[in-house]
Amino acid sequence: DTGVSQDPRHKITKRGQNVTFRCDPISEHNRLYWYRQTLGQGPEFLTYFQNEAQLEKSRLLSDRFSAERPKGSFSTLEIQRTEQGDSAMYLCASSFLGTEDYGYTFGSGTRLTVV
Amino acid sequence: DAKTTQPPSMDCAEGRAANLPCNHSTISGNEYVYWYRQIHSQGPQYIIHGLKNNETNEMASLIITEDRKSSTLILPHATLRDTAVYYCIASGYSGYALNFGKGTSLLVTP
């Protein structure tokens, strides 16, 4: 297994356009998380899935944001009508909820720049 | 989750032990202390976690005070590759919304 993969690594978009990011978690992990990180700050929680169910969403996740995880495998995060304030690193992580806790495994992130 | 407090930055000489402190005075009885680090331009990496006993793995040791109000992450022989931002997080077991804060920026120097 090559870990958590995120695509694309970088995305530049014009204000008002829609963008979609993809995350492929570690295959046996049943939890998947999305975080956002701006310059100089630590990652901030956006949402998470357990299998295919989206169980929690942060208030940071406005109506313009939507995340899916069909069939409990890969996940997508879509931002509609992007704004300059959406510029950030979007991080995906996965973990296995079981009797042992091995922490999250993060991907390398998708850096979004809205111009 | 309880708030944690970390110094914004620390230096350490290569080959020496790096001791990174964290205060979590309001931690509740069922909250664990997790440590992650983030090397520039990469996603965070899990290091270690503990509840009340000291823990050690191949990456680091975690020392938690008896009253659980503070902890120290120890990198026994720091290398240049350990230069990173280190985050101390208090969270329930397998918590889903980790509060990373700003962490401690550790610079390991030759």
Image (cartoon, rainbow, N blue to C red):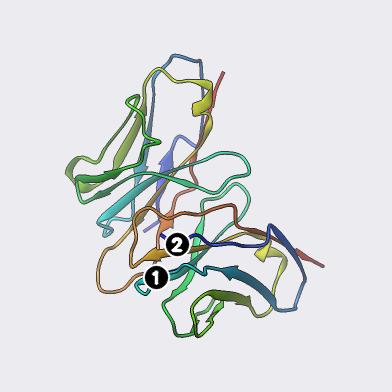
User: Which subunit holds the residue at mark 2?
Assistant: B
Q: For residue A67, what is the image quadrant?
A: top left
Q: Amino acid at mark 1?
A: Ser
Q: Residue B109: percent from the left, percent from the top?
A: 80, 65
Count of numbered badges drawn on the protein: 2
Horizontal side of A111 relative to B52 (left or right) equals: right
Q: Earlier in the sequence, mark 1 or mark 2?
A: 2
Q: Residue B8: percent from the left, percent from the top?
A: 68, 57
Residue at horizontal 44 percent and vertical 53 percent from the top: A106
- Would you call the spot at circle 2 few (<14 residues within 10 Å), some (14-19), or many (20 or more)? some
Check disc 2 and report the residue beneath it.
Answer: B2
Check disc 1 and report the residue beneath it.
Answer: B28
Q: Secondary structure at mark 2?
A: loop
Q: Which mark is residue A65?
A: none
Residue at horizontal 60 percent and vertical 46 percent from the top: B41
Q: Residue B86: percent from the left, percent from the top?
A: 59, 61
Residue at horizontal 44 percent and vertical 20 percent from the top: A82
* Quarter that holds the N terminus of chain B: bottom left
Q: Residue B67: percent from the left, percent from the top?
A: 49, 82
Horizontal side of B107 relative to B6 (left or right) equals: right
Q: Amino acid at mark 2?
A: Ala
